[in-house]
Amino acid sequence: MTDVPATTEVETGPDVETGAAVEALLGTDTSRFRHDYLEVRGLRVTFGGFVAVRDVDLTVTQGDLRFLIGPNGAGKTTLIDAITGLASATGSARFGGKELLGRGTHRIARDGVGRTFQTASVFEQLTVLQNLDIAAGARRGPGTLLRRRRGVPEPVEQALELVGLSALRDTTAGVLAHGQKQWLEIGMLLVQDAHLLLLDEPVAGMTHAEREATGELLRRIGSQRVVVVVEHDMEFLRSFADSVTVMHQGQVLAEGTVADVQNDPAVVEVYLGSPVVSDPTPPTGADATPVSATATKENA
Ligand SMILES: Nc1ncnc2c1ncn2[C@@H]1O[C@H](COP(=O)(O)OP(=O)(O)OP(=O)(O)O)[C@@H](O)[C@H]1O
Ligand SMILES: [Mg+2]
């Protein structure tokens, strides 16, 4: 993985040069989670007779920015749904020493597990700041809300800075660009003190510059927290993934470094569509076309 570039040319967005305050936020309460990791064993989700996720094993540690890829319908979102309590599952998914399966979504969130959705789910009528404050309140609970200091709580201020939305704090979330909504959602997870972040296609629809800024943001967050990113964009994956898990038809097909999975014949066959050369020809235009955009349709 390359070092963080000195500058990223976007007007708003994650600031790769943010300072100690941000490190303070990223390091929030690490004592609770320092040695924690996500450990999924034999996880299975069925819808009626259909097995959407089949006996998945997955281990992700802090500092290992994990990408989860696979054709449409591979079971990526369903796996996240199961871990976060939205889909019933059998097997085991542990984080922070706790079994997550069988617990309610709210308790799982309180245990430090946060996720984003393929479509951004911010409160569109409220401002950026109000969205973050609600997320922070969800973590604190009503008693703490009443005792809140005047002004913007420090973790909210830090999250604004980290995700690059300080200048847009009073903007209604509904008018934010798609990328900015995704950053706001990530900020909401940070103020909730989520230490396992499961992000479902966070850069879909973003410009190249927004994707780069998001990648740097995820790298920073991933150094302190356990982060799993579902993503189809192979250029983004090559730039930012520490490791990759490939799913196909509900199962883990392959796992390893980017190079490992790109050169895995089974992955090439079901997902990438054609052998991956070491220096692929850049697609036309500023934005890369996700390799899987073609492969997934053909192979799903
Ligand atoms: N609530 C549901 N009821 C029935 N089948 C479902 C349900 N949710 C998902 N599925 C099916 O489970 C399989 C896995 O879907 P899932 O959304 O997890 O795939 P995915 O890997 O996230 O795909 P994509 O890349 O398109 O987002 C698909 O065949 C899908 O149709
Ligand atoms: Mg999905």
Image: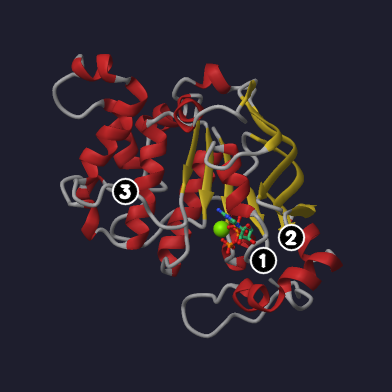
Query: Does the CB distance between marks 1 and 2 fall below 8 Å?
Result: yes
Q: Secondary structure at mark 1?
A: loop
Q: Quadrant of residue 80?
A: top right
Residue occupying the point 29% across, 27% down: 137
Amino acid type, mark 2? His
Q: Is residue 114 above or below residue 78?
A: above
Disc 1, ligand 1: is the CB inside 8 Å?
yes
Residue 48 visible in the displayed image: yes
Q: Secondary structure at mark 3?
A: loop
* Image spot of residue 13 (x, y percent): 34, 53
Instruction: Kindly report the distance in space between the C-alpha atoms of the residues bearing marks 1 and 2.
Output: 7 Å
Q: Which residue is mark 1?
A: 71
User: Earlier along the polypeptide chain: callout 1 or callout 3?
Assistant: 1
* Image spot of residue 263 (x, y percent): 82, 66
User: Earlier along the polypeptide chain: callout 2 or callout 3?
Assistant: 3
Q: Which residue is mark 3?
A: 122
Relative side of 230 to 131, left or right: right
